[in-house]
Image: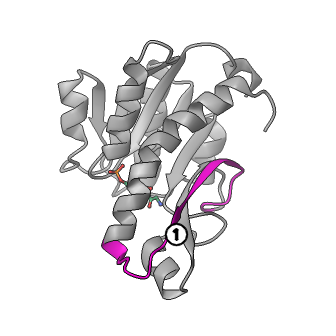
Amino acid sequence: MEKLIGRNLNISVFISGRGSNLLSLIKYSKIKKSKIKINLIITNNKFSKGLEFAKKNKIKNYIINYSKKKEAEHKILEYLRKNKIDLICLAGFMKILSSSFIKKFKNPILNIHPSLLPRYKGLNTHRRAIENKDKFSGATVHFVTPKLDSGKIILQKKVRILKSDTEKTLAKKVLKIEHKLYPSAIEKILKKSSF
Ligand code: GAR
């Protein structure tokens, strides 16, 4: 971690779908004070809408066939090495990375998750928060470890759940805060030496 502090970072973003968090990271990478460059986009889904952002911004992108996970991860590691990637940002990447991949990649891997972890690891976070009549939900950026959605938390932000909220309206509110949270979490790890 220490070796990343205060220097420019080459980032690879992994996506599976819409890619709105990818877009927020691309926008952030373009502001003057930003110390990140998005060099590589990886997806397991050739229909990811997020691939359009890769193309529009001329960012190298690879569609990886995940039917054989071991081979897929081997290929990804090769691309990461070739592109000198310092940090991976999972942004709506719906595949679980193996512990061997996490170990081999040596540098940090971050994930954004649509809940206030440790509450609601896994899927259907908004539905579960509403069903449990929670007053708040939110989003979390955390380090990725082999245990799903359980790595150290970097940053979290809350939103209030209103009685009138549905899964859809809550998802929209949370997504809006995600777009600010991910860049802020990267800024935070670039400043801080110990996690
Ligand atoms: C985001 O809400 C992200 O938090 C969630 O998928 C969505 C992706 O949206 N990630 C997970 O659920 C991971 N477990 P996007 O493709 O528009 O960034």
Magenta stretch holds residue 57: no
Which residue shows up at 29% across the image and 35% down it?
Answer: 62
- Viewer-proximal residue among 39 and 120: 120
* Furthest residue in direction right, as rendered: 194
> Does residue 76 appear left or right of residue 111 in this picture?
left
> Which residue is tagged 1?
122
The residue under the point 30% across, 49% down is: 65
* Residue 152 is covered by the magenta coloring: yes
Badge 1 density bin: few <14, some 14–19, many ≥20, Cα 10 Å: few
In the image, is residue 145 above or below residue 30? Answer: below
Name the side, left or right, on which 121 lies relative to 90.
right
Residue lying at 52% horizontally and 43% vertically, measured from the top left: 181
In the rendered view, tell whether residue 154 sits above or below residue 80.
below
Asked whether 73 or 145 is in front, the reply is 145
Q: Position of residue 21 (x, y in %)?
A: 38, 43
Query: Which of 83/188 is in front?
Result: 188
- Residue 124 is at least partly visible in this image: no
Q: Is residue 3 left or right of residue 107?
A: right
Magenta extent: 148-168
Q: Amino acid at mark 1?
A: Gly
Q: Quadrant of the N terminus?
A: top right
Splitting the image into four quadrants, where does ligand 1 fall? bottom left
- Relative depth, front residue between 174 and 68: 174
Say whether mark 1 is within 8 Å of ligand 1.
yes
